[in-house]
Image: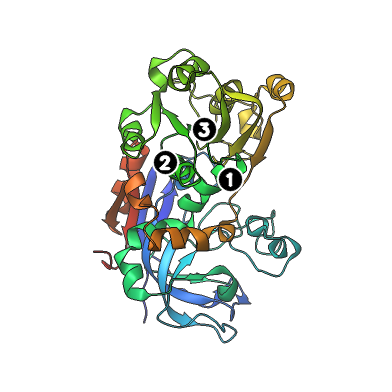
Amino acid sequence: MKTNRGVVYVKPGLVEVQSIEYPRLMHGDKKCEHGVILKVIATNICGSDQHMVRGRTAAPTGLVLGHEITGEVVEKGSDVEFIDVGDIVSVPFNVACGRCRNCKAGLTNLCMTTNPEVAGAAYGYVAMGGWVGGQAEYVMVPYADFNLLKFPDKQQAMEKIRDLSLLSDIFPTGFHGAMEAKVGAGSFVYIAGAGPVGLAAAASCHLLGAACVIVGDFKKERLALAKKFGCETIDLSTISSLPEAIAQIIGVPEVDSAIDCVGFEAKQDTKTEQGSAALNTMILATRSGGTVGLVGLYVPMDPGSKDPYAREGILGVRMGWSWIKGLSYNMGQTPVMRYHRQLMNCILHNKIEIAKAVNVTVVSLDDAPKAYQDFDNGAPKKFVIDPHGMIK
């Protein structure tokens, strides 16, 4: 009998590695002959996972976590034509059918068929379609021909697997934030948050030709990572005004583009949570006619918040200044397939070292619970779980 183990959400603050069902080409009672079963090579811990583990969502006990997945195909359905057993593939965190109106328009982040509750589905996430997560030894991926990105050379892929593992989410998400903020050659950019997505966004801004990339955070260790690859940094615990701090770097108090990589658990200072704090400071620090990209997670319901409005997903935003300045906002989950092939090429042809930028740290499946704790305590690392010991 085939066995499987995965990282399971137990209760707020607690995850465990447990025996779980070995995947079948099924989703509930629906056959998935269009799917494959992967032996997971790398599966990453994401800040979005932490929102659930902290008890800030309605995640149920027993949820198998993990939406950042890279793996080797060990079984395929009868309807799969272009993916073969033995292929090493990247899995976009978006579960997309490839057939609905939104998928055909390239909005794979808003697939209309893979989640009965709302447009958009993901693996191992609350209210995102019930798809089993990939922080496990094996996982099933549907609509394989459409969803999967096959790496062209298996040996090369394994040599660069630390970088390639980031194609399932944070590298495309950081790049999407930069694109949504209209970052280009010569741009001045401010990024809120020096976690893995913020660092990926900063590296993406450099890739796009930004003149100056400024990263703000309360954690000195994370800011030190941003400095290592050429970013300017602002320790938010030491300033009273973000525009003034920006002016000290570029000579003017406003940037062309701002990227929110923090989301709804933003802090006003080192202790006080204020869900719109990052967004509101960015509004003041973005020039008239500038653009804000929001890839940090915001939720329609936040049952763990102390603020009764925030529990309903209502945040106090500086709409007056937004209107007066004529700011443009672009937000939402990343359509990973829009970018992942191009970003793969950048990795394979040595245009970027994204694993180095976000400080990828490989851990075993059994060490995943401790990695969750370390990440929640602000460790300046991107934890990549290696369930089978396949990563050098």
Along the line of sight, the residue nearer the viewer: 29 or 274:
274
Query: Residue at the spot x=59%, y=20% of the render?
Result: 284
Amino acid type indicated by mark 3: Val
Q: Which mark is residue 179?
A: 1
**Res. 291 visible in picture:** yes
What residue occupies the far left of the structure in this picture? 392
Query: Residue at the spot x=64%, y=28% of the render?
Result: 315
Q: Position of residue 16 (x, y in %)?
A: 35, 54
What residue occupies the far bottom of the structure in this picture? 78
From the viewer's perspective, is the residue at label 2 or at label 1 nearer? 1
Q: Earlier in the sequence, mark 1 or mark 3?
A: 1
From the viewer's perspective, is the residue at label 2 or at label 3 nearer? 3
Amino acid type indicated by mark 2: Leu
Along the line of sight, the residue nearer the viewer: 326 or 47:
326
Q: Residues within 10 Å of mark 2 (few under 14, many from 20)?
A: many
Query: Residue at the spot x=55%, y=63% of the render?
Result: 131
Q: Identify whether 88 is placed above or below 340.
A: below
Give me the C-alpha separation between circle 2 and circle 3. 13 Å
Q: Position of residue 357 (x, y in %)?
A: 35, 45
Q: Position of residue 331 (x, y in %)?
A: 64, 42
**What kind of element bears circle 3?**
strand
**What kind of element bears circle 1?**
helix
Quarter of the image where one finds residue 111: bottom right
Along the line of sight, the residue nearer the viewer: 32 or 255:
255
Amino acid type indicated by mark 1: Met
Residue, disc 3:
189
Q: Which mark is residue 199?
A: 2
